[in-house]
Image: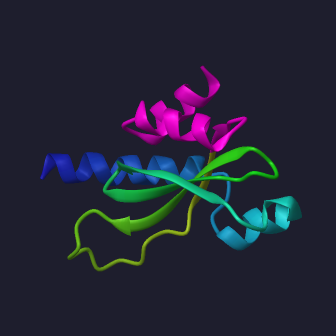
Amino acid sequence: MGEYHERSADLSRLGHEADFKHMDAFYEANPDRRGEGQAVGTIDDADVHWSITWLPKTHEVIAQASNWLDPDHEEHVPDYVIIAGSARSENAAKAAVVRSHSIETLKDALYG
């Protein structure tokens, strides 16, 4: 029970820290973000499966909430978009994901 509350608090924290609450707002903020992003991996953090994408035009690496880790979770998956950092190439973004076990460590890997 305590672990559930910790993860719920982590998701709430990530929601407050999300750069955008919706993907549409992310695209509206910078039209160069539209187009072909390259999937570079996934990270499981705060009860959510996050898809990590590298955007070639802006070099941004973003995390999008894609699914609950618990398949029986009934709430809608939040549409959070977190800009984790930037990478000069798809391979650099992949390498950062491999070294990461959370959104926070991904940010550290991209800025480090």
Q: Residue 65: x percent and y percent?
A: 48, 62
Q: Nearer the viewer, residue 92 or 74?
A: 92
2 left or right of 82 in image: left
Indicate whether 35 appears above or below 19.
Answer: below
Q: Residue furthest top?
A: 112
| Most common SS among magenta residues | helix
Task: Find residue 103 and report its horizontal and vertical position in percent.
Answer: 47, 41
Q: Quadrant of residue 70?
A: bottom left
Q: Nearer the viewer, residue 40 or 80?
A: 40
Residue at image coords 26%, 74% = 73
Closer to us: 13 or 85: 85
User: Is 54 displayed left or right of 16 in the figure?
Assistant: right
Image point (42%, 36%), residue name:
98
Which residue lies at the image location 80% right of the left edge and 48% below the top edge? 58
- In the rendered view, would you say 13 is above or below 108? below
In which quadrant is the C terminus drawn?
Answer: top right
Q: Which residues are magenta?
A: 84-112
User: Residue 81: x, y in percent?
Assistant: 61, 58
The verdict on residue 104 being magenta is: yes
Q: Residue at x 63, y 44 (%)?
A: 90
Q: Is residue 98 magenta?
A: yes
* Quadrant hosting residue 64: bottom right
Residue most extreme to the front: 91
Task: Judge left or right: residue 39 versus residue 11.
Answer: right
